[in-house]
């Protein structure tokens, strides 16, 4: 049974909890005991008798014998194999052993077991942890297997550990960071998208900064050992506060929990009050209670304790880690559905209304009977026109509004709105590109919503420079300024999605994405700032910025797959809106982050700076970005001359 029914969690894989089992020749009984009776959702079970060795079979003249798998494929239905069994590859295998017999036996067995699991249509197999720091042959063999797999994933078992450098001699050979083991293995396997991680969660945890790295990696499962649990006052298993927080993060990132090990808690009672049992609590059944049921109940309790997903998060679920090409607002006309989505963002328009109200109060004294000329450039279907008129009503100021819109389809809706609301005497609709409109008078206030996820990536600077000629010398632009930000991220899924296209073009494109399964490796830093109106004599929207990031010393090494980009805008004085994580406007969904991928991911060490260069380039017909890394090693400059990605003027 799933851990619980919670709003927004209906499709999350983290609702399902598994159990690690020993080898059994009776798979139907294994499933009955652990799933039907025990309440777990799936088993992580060995598929091959652990005593099997190919070399021994050959010595016994067993060349044609049947391999000692855990029963025929017919003992379970295809859906049972697929939904309830994760194959556990024999833990004795060691493909990098100095013993040639063991090495050859290991390779043969690994291939036989995965071939069998593939035959059964299992969704995943659990690979044993590499036995030593050197795992080249193991990775080579796994990479060969990955080339021939259909959809099955291979979960590499990795212990969640990192010895703190200040806790022991730095020269000690026992210093270990298990992330390094994973990184070495995945590099040897060419970042294969079907190679994932099952983390072994131990009784002691590394630092918070060290843990964060894993949430940008392809972690599918977390195996929590029974000896990692503490005992509460009533004798039941529980986890430390740090472990509880970690498990909640696993839930939030769709990582499935697996209980491993033997019961080390004697259950004081037959039933648990933490989570209601889904089975009859008669005496006979409670006596046969699964030995790990109290651990499952506790994990279920932690799941039930979580808050339901807010409405906004539920709306964004389908967009998580889904790459979208940015809009081309000047080249293309937006569709009705796009307008509809943006117009639902009430928070954004509340901020605009606040900014316009403040500007009107500053512009017009209380007693004065002055009509303020306000121009909405890029009016769309009218939400900013409405916000402007509401601000005028709120402040008791008179307005004359020009709504300038280049999309003829949106203009139809604008005319309908003006007629419906009775705004004909206040609002004049101009069907024209703001850059080429010859305005009959100058504006006191210029209002626009031309910002992209990276601030200037939808050509707000170029559009507002073109419209500035019809703003009075002392006029107000809303927004008055905006700044873009970037930060380095581990984003294994995003990287693999880009890589799947097998070309340079996709690696040189910036994507709009609701980033979720990423690790933010350092605080974001400002990149480009634009201010409006801009009366400087040398008007250029080209920009260049060199940035240097450092990751926390206790984090350990990390892989940078690219950069997450954001913006923060000052609408007017202290009224701002933006998506930069530390100052983000709450409950606003008009913008997701932007992602700049790296063609070759960069591994950074703690204390070693990451040096990044970003350019905003302008041509006669397009604007584009170029980016590269120069430390710890130099990369190629990506998107040179806008060859792959640009925004058309």
Image (tube, helix red, strand yellow):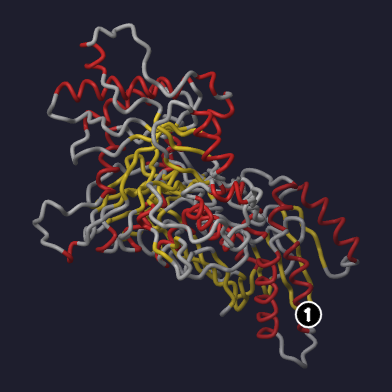
Give coordinates of residue 346: x percent, y percent: 71, 65
The N terminus lies in which quarter of the figure?
top right
* Residue 276 shown left or right of residue 125 in the figure: right
Viewer-nearest residue: 389 or 648: 389
Question: Whole-percent x and y of residue 371?
Answer: 78, 80
The residue shown at (20%, 52%) is: 176
Viewer-closest of 287 and 332: 287
At which x and y percent is residue 380? 73, 55
The reply, left or right, for residue 490 in relation to residue 276 is left
Is disc 1 surrounded by few (<14), some (14 to 19) or many (20+) residues within 10 Å?
few
When the figure is inspected, residue 159 is found, relative to residue 414, above or below; the finding is above
Q: How many marks?
A: 1
Q: Is residue 61 left or right of residue 234?
A: left
Q: Residue furthest bottom?
A: 367
**Pick the front one: 303 or 35:** 35
State whether residue 594 appears in this view: no
Q: Is residue 516 visible?
A: yes
Residue pushed farthest left? 171
> Residue 394's spot in the image, x, y percent?
78, 81
Q: In screen coordinates, is 475 left or right of 569?
A: right
The residue nearer to you, when weighing 30 against 476, is 30
Give the answer, above or below, for where 407 lies relative to 451. Answer: above
Question: Circle 1 sits on which residue?
Answer: 371
Q: In the figure, residue 156 lies in which quadrant?
A: top left
**Helix, strand or loop for disc 1:** strand
Image quadrant where residue 21 sits: top left
Residue 27, placed above or below residue 319: above
């Amino acid at each position: 049974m799933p851990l619980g029914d919670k709003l927004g969690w209906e499709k999350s894989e983290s609702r399902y909890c598994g159990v690690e089992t020993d080898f059994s020749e009776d798979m139907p009984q294994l499933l009955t005991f652990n799933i039907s009776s025990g309440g777990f959702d799936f088993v992580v079970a060995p598929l091959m008798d652990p005593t099997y060795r190919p070399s021994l079979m050959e010595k016994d003249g067993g060349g044609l014998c049947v391999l000692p798998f855990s029963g025929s494929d017919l003992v379970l239905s295809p859906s049972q194999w697929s939904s309830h069994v994760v194959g556990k590859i024999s833990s004795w295998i060691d493909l990098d052993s100095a013993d040639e017999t063991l090495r050859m036996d290991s390779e043969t067995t690994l291939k036989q077991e995965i071939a069998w699991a593939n035959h059964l249509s299992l969704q995943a197999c659990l690979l044993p942890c590499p036995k030593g720091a050197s795992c080249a042959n193991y990775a080579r063999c796994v990479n060969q297997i990955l080339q021939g797999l259909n959809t099955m994933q291979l979960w590499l078992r990795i212990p969640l550990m990192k010895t703190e450098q200040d806790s022991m001699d730095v020269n000690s050979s026992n210093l270990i960071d298990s992330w390094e083991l994973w990184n070495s293995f995945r590099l040897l396997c060419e970042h294969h998208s079907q190679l994932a991680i099952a983390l072994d969660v131990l009784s002691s945890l590394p630092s918070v900064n060290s843990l964060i790295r894993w949430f940008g990696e392809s972690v599918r499962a977390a195996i929590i050992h029974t000896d990692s649990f503490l005992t509460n006052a009533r004798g039941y298993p529980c986890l430390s506060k740090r472990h509880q927080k970690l498990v909640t993060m696993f839930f939030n990132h769709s990582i499935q929990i697996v209980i491993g090990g033997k019961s080390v808690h004697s259950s004081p009672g037959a039933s648990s009050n933490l989570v209601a049992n889904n089975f009859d609590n008669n005496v006979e059944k409670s006596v046969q209670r699964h030995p790990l049921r109290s651990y499952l109940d506790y994990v279920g309790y932690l799941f039930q304790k979580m808050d339901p997903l807010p409405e906004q998060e539920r709306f964004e679920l389908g967009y998580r880690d889904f790459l979208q090409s940015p809009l081309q607002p000047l080249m293309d006309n937006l569709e009705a559905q796009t307008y509809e989505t943006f117009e639902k963002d009430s928070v954004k328009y509340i901020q605009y209304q606040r900014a316009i109200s403040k500007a009107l109060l500053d512009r017009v004294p209380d007693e004065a009977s002055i009509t303020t000329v306000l121009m909405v450039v890029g009016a769309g279907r009218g939400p900013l026109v409405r916000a402007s008129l509401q601000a005028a009503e709120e402040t008791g100021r008179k307005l004359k509004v020009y709504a300038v819109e280049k999309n003829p389809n949106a203009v139809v809706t604008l005319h309908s709105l003006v007629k419906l609301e009775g705004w004909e005497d206040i609002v004049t609709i101009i069907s024209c590109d703001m850059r080429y409109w010859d305005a009959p008078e100058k504006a006191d206030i210029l209002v626009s919503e031309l910002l992209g996820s990276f601030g200037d990536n939808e050509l707000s600077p170029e559009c507002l420079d073109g419209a500035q000629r019809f703003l009075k010398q002392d006029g107000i632009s809303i927004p008055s300024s905006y700044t873009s930000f970037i930060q380095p991220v581990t984003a294994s899924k995003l990287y693999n999605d880009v890589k799947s296209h097998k070309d340079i073009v996709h690696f040189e494109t910036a994507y709009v994405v609701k980033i979720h399964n990423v690790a933010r490796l350092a605080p974001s830093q400002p990149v480009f700032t634009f201010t409006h109106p801009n009366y400087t004599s040398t008007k250029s929207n080209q920009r260049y910025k060199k940035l240097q990031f450092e990751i926390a010393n206790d984090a350990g090494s990390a892989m940078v797959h690219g950069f997450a980009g954001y913006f923060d805008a000052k609408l007017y004085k202290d009224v701002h809106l933006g998506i930069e994580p530390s100052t983000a406007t709450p409950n606003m969904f008009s913008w997701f982050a932007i992602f700049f991928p790296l063609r070759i991911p960069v591994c950074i060490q703690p204390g070693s700076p990451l040096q990044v260069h970003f350019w905003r380039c302008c041509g006669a017909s397009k604007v584009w970005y170029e980016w590269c890394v120069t430390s710890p090693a130099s990369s190629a400059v990506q998107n040179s001359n806008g060859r792959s990605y640009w925004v058309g003027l």
